[in-house]
């Protein structure tokens, strides 16, 4: 295919310096995991026809969950070095014979569409091109004792990033040759291309295209993402369903065995209904009944996570993020506390939010009122939603 472009996203590292229980590329950020952000950016770029992720064998389940629904090629397993992982990605693309291939790190989730476009244009022009930044600090060479031995001419120096872009065939040939010669530790693809004798040119990188490496990097990325969403809204929601026949209740997407069920048109999940209304309230976009009329038979018995997912989609469509969700559940029974963390985890999963952004409390009403008489269950919810200024009135 003429002028076809493919992307290899390298995600096989362990990312240990970033701390945390999961590799950094799978960390839960409010904008989604870094790997999902990266893959989405490449998929959405109209010039790119195929996106190949390279992952660590231990991450297959994580990857499947993080990248569910994305239009990408089946992931391939990486090797013990970054270089081996890139080669695995290139080999997986070799039958397609793209003209240009972009190689990008999954830990750089902020590469813009413009940067991707520049990389493609530069590689078409020179055959091998990398994004580079001028240095603003003075650079010194020092010896082992910490003594300055030289002040380098920073005008000749650049720091480089990814995506690095290459004519596909020469890069694959260079990688194969390096592997055959047992050279396994080139720090980037440009270094390997230089070794193979290819001319590598630079194009303008982006200061925001940082590689998330340390815990501080993640904190800064979150802070910047949230800081840009200055229109902070609070929405509230309230829902009640009556007890009736049944042997379980759905609470926050979790089935809890109980001597009674809850009566409702859908699965009568008061927590997810109240949360949906809280988010819609923050958006000032009506309520659950407007979008999912009880008169419509298609919502009969529906699993309520779709209502919450709808409100989350509306939030994303406005360019916003959920900062926090908080719920108070009111009932005499069943006892909620044994299920508190399971419910929070389920909501976190539906909303793609860290667990620390979901609060859940439960209380009785001291046998007063309809909840006290065990006639039904009630839930109050509050959603804190951050939107960009001017996303609507
Ligand atoms: Mg309801």
Image (tube, rainbow, N blue to C red):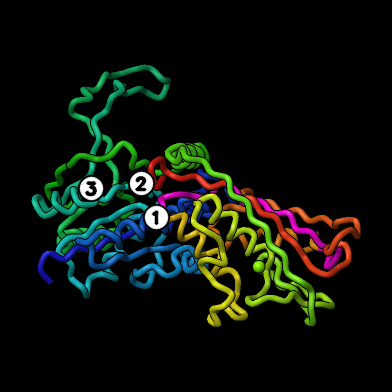
**Mark closer to the chain start, 1 or 2:** 1
Q: Residue at x 38, y 17 (%)?
A: 147
Q: Circle 3 sits on which residue?
A: 114
CA distance separating discs 3 and 1: 15 Å
The front one of 161 and 69 is 69
Element on which disc 2 rests: loop
Question: Residue 238: horizontal and vertical position, in percent?
Answer: 67, 58
Element on which disc 3 rests: helix
Q: Are marks 1 and 2 in contact (CB under 8 Å)?
A: yes
Label 2 crowd bin: few (<14), some (14–19), many (20+), radius 10 Å: some
Question: Where's the C terminus, which quadrant?
Answer: top left
Q: Would you say residue 214 is visible in this rendering?
A: no
The front one of 274 and 103 is 274
- What is the magenta range? 318-335
Q: Circle 2 sits on which residue?
A: 110
Q: Which mark is residue 37?
A: 1
Question: Residue 48: horizontal and vertical position, in percent?
Answer: 23, 62
């Amino acid at each position: 295919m003429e002028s076809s472009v493919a992307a290899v996203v390298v995600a096989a590292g362990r990312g240990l310096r970033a701390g945390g229980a999961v590799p950094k590329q799978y960390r839960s950020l409010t904008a989604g995991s870094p790997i999902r952000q990266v893959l989405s950016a490449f998929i959405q770029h109209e010039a790119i026809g195929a996106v190949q992720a390279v992952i660590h064998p231990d991450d297959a389940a994580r990857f499947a969950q993080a990248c569910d629904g994305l239009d990408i090629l089946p992931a391939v397993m990486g090797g013990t070095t970054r270089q081996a992982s890139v080669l695995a990605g290139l080999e997986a693309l070799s039958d397609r014979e793209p003209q240009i291939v972009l190689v990008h790190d999954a830990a750089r989730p902020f590469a813009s569409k413009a940067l991707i476009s520049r990389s493609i244009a530069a590689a078409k022009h020179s055959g091998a091109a990398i994004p580079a930044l001028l240095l603003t600090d003075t650079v010194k060479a020092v010896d082992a004792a910490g003594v300055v031995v030289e002040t380098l001419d920073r005008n000749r120096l650049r720091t480089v990033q990814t995506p690095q872009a290459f004519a596909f065939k020469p890069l694959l040939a260079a990688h194969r040759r390096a592997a055959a010669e047992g050279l396994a530790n080139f720090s980037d693809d440009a270094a390997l291309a230089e070794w193979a004798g290819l001319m590598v040119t630079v194009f303008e990188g982006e200061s925001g295209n940082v590689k998330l490496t340390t815990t501080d990097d993640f904190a800064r990325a979150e802070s910047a993402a949230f800081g840009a969403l200055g229109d902070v809204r609070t929405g509230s929601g309230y829902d009640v369903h009556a007890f009736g026949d049944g042997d379980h209740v759905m609470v926050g997407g979790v089935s809890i065995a109980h001597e009674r069920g809850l009566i409702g048109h859908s699965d009568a999940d008061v927590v997810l209904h109240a949360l949906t209304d809280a988010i819609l309230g923050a958006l000032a976009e009506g309520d659950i009944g407007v979008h999912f009329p009880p008169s419509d038979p298609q919502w009969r018995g529906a699993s309520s996570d779709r209502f919450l997912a709808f409100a989350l989609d509306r939030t994303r469509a406005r360019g916003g993020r959920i900062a926090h969700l908080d719920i108070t559940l009111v009932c005499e029974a069943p006892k909620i506390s044994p299920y508190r963390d399971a419910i929070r985890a389920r909501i976190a999963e539906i909303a793609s939010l860290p667990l620390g952004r979901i609060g859940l409390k439960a209380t009785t009403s001291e046998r007063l009122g309809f909840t006290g008489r065990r006639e039904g269950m009630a839930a109050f919810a509050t959603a804190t939603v951050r939107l960009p200024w001017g996303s609507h009135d």
